[in-house]
Image (tube, rainbow, N blue to C red):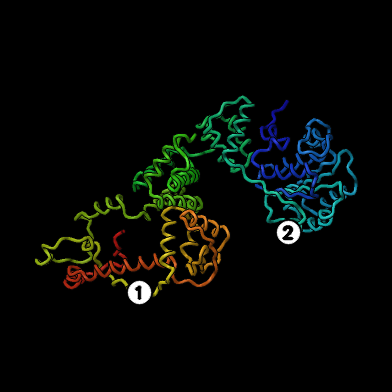
């Protein structure tokens, strides 16, 4: 007997065996038990998530000799023949290769005849979005009012291409991509039945590579069994998939956290020599950075001691080394960097540019201070013009950082920013709302768009038990944002009913923060420009202050 691939051998034959689609199973089983059956179903979802499988199980449930049931027996003639693909009253049409009006009309001509063997005729059209417009038009009338013995089952990976006239005639179910944990668990059961040993880490690699498709996961498992000579070990699976070892990812992240550009460049060259995929490295790094961000934002969510991932402790340690804002920035750089690899003539040079970009945007820290210190030697110190020795009056004056020669250049003085009064006017409720929002931010009760709603809104009324906010951007005024903001207020003890209206604002927390920053910037510039030593340098040596070089000290 020829070998049957795992994807076909372990295709679910009942709703109980179908994994990862409980929402679809529940709806269909309830409909079968109550016999409230629709005449047309549309199953959507990516490849390999079970659309055709659900169609076959539904056909068995409708035609099982035990009666209409959510648990087909699997042994009667109808069930076995549907599983074998030779049941006369169950027809599968592949619209990708039969997309014309003639093929659809031939199918519909069979609709006038009652079932030969079963209780219902079931027409299953796969990849229905591939049908031509004339084919869709030909089936509309029959799809809307089919005979009582006919059921339509449509499946597609791209529901947006299906005409709305068809969508409105069907019950639509979206089959979700499988979670990696679900795939790992199912692969473990399959390999256990096959008596094949497998590392959990190897199964995780396969689950990530499957991209939510259980069929792809089983196909990759078949390939891994052949590649590994009957066993699934992490090194062999990683080699088969071309995945990058996480040790390289950890090396990159640790070097970037320390501002060590040399290690980044050298490791990129090592990847070139080993022939490892730059795209795979950025993908793996994105996954690690996502877990680091979770550790930074919600440190008590899970314990690294109980996490089954052996790299959990290392990820927690890296999350403590890299600031949260740099983690977010590096995650974004890795996501967008994958698209840049194909544009560069050398993917490894592009990889180094993607990673070194973080150092270019890195705030001033220890790594930058080391670079500046090494650059301030007499041999490399810049000199735009001859500077005479300092006057005796300045000999005893303590040196200031802003007086370093590198900060002196013949550039125009910076333009003054607008006055604070031009960007903000205070309102009676502004200070109270600003304090409440700051408390929610510090307690990390609001995130993302909910935080944006709070920052961009102005409190215009506070009555007993109800607050009214006003916001300019209508896109922020959504039910989800409002509900989350109200829950955050309740967590701080403000048991109020919150409502939001759209309108102009003048006193929001965001405007106050901008005004405070501007005020501190103006104060810092005034302190420098009014400093006697600075004024003397400008007068004696025609020195200029580099625009943008004056920054207020952090709080």
Q: Quadrant of the N terminus?
A: top right
Residue 19 x/y as whole percent: 65, 38
The mark closer to the camera, 1 or 2, is 1
Q: Nearer the viewer, residue 238 or 505?
A: 505
Query: On the image, numbered disc 1 is attached to which residue?
Result: 419
Residue 424 showing in the rendered view: no
| Relative to 216, residue 231 above or below | above
Distance from disc 1 to disc 2, alpha carbons, whole Å, reads 55 Å
User: What residue is shown at x 54% (from left), y 37% (from top)?
Assistant: 205
In the image, taking residue 349 as reference, residue 14 lies left or right, namely right
Q: Nearer the viewer, residue 489 or 108?
A: 489
Within the image, what quadrant is residue 540 found in?
bottom left
| SS class, disc 2 | helix
| SS class, disc 1 | loop
Query: On the image, numbered disc 2 is attached to which residue?
Result: 164
In the image, taking residue 54 as reference, residue 541 lies left or right, namely left
């Amino acid at each position: 007997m020829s070998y049957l691939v795992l994807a076909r051998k372990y295709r679910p034959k009942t709703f109980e065996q179908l994994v990862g689609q409980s929402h679809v199973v529940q709806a269909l089983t309830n409909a079968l038990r109550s016999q409230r059956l629709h005449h047309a179903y549309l199953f959507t979802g990516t490849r390999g998530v079970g659309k055709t499988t659900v169609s076959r199980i539904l056909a068995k449930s409708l035609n099982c000799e035990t009666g209409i049931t959510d648990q087909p027996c699997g042994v009667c003639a109808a069930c076995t023949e549907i599983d074998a693909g030779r049941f006369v009253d169950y027809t599968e049409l592949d619209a990708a290769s039969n997309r014309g009006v003639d093929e659809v009309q031939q199918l519909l001509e069979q609709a006038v005849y009652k079932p030969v063997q079963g209780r219902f005729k079931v027409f299953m059209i796969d990849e229905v979005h591939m049908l031509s417009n004339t084919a869709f038009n030909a089936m509309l009338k029959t799809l809307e009012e089919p005979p009582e013995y006919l059921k339509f089952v449509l499946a597609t990976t791209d529901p947006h291409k299906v005409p709305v006239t068809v969508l409105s005639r069907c019950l639509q179910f979206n089959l979700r991509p499988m979670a990696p944990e679900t795939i790992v668990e199912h692969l473990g059961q399959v390999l256990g039945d096959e008596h094949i040993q497998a590392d959990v880490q190897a199964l995780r690699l396969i689950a990530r590579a499957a991209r939510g498709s259980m069929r792809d996961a089983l196909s990759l498992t078949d390939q891994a069994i052949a590649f590994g000579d009957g066993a699934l070990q992490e090194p062999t699976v990683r080699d088969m998939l071309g995945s990058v070892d996480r040790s390289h990812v950890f090396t990159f992240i640790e070097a970037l956290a320390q501002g060590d550009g040399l290690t980044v460049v050298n490791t990129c060259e090592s990847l070139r020599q080993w022939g490892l995929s730059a795209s795979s490295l950025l993908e793996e790094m994105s996954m690690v950075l996502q877990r680091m961000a979770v550790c930074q934002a919600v440190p008590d969510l899970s314990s690294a001691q109980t996490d089954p991932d052996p790299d959990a402790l290392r990820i927690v340690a890296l999350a403590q080394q890299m600031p949260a804002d740099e983690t977010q920035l590096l995650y974004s750089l890795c996501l967008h960097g994958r698209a840049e690899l194909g544009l560069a003539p050398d993917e490894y040079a592009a990889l180094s540019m993607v990673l070194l970009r973080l150092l270019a945007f890195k705030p001033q820290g220890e790594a930058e201070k080391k670079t500046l210190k090494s650059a301030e030697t007499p041999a490399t110190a810049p000199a735009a013009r001859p500077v005479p020795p300092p006057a005796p009056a300045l000999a005893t004056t303590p040196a200031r950082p802003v007086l370093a020669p590198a900060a002196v250049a013949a550039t125009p003085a910076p333009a003054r920013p607008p006055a604070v009064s031009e960007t903000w006017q205070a309102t009676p409720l502004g200070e109270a709302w600003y304090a409440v929002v700051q408390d929610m931010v510090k307690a990390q009760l609001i995130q993302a768009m909910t935080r944006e709603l709070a920052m961009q809104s102005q409190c215009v009324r506070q009555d007993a038990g109800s607050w009214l906010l006003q916001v300019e951007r209508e896109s922020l005024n959504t039910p989800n944002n409002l509900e989350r903001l109200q829950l955050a207020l309740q967590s701080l003890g403000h048991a109020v009913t919150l409502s939001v209206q759209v309108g102009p604002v003048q006193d929001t927390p965001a405007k106050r923060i901008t005004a405070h920053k501007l005020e501190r910037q103006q104060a810092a510039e005034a302190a420098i420009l009014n400093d006697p030593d600075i004024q003397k340098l400008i007068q004696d040596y025609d020195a200029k202050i580099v625009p943008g070089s004056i920054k207020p000290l952090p709080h």
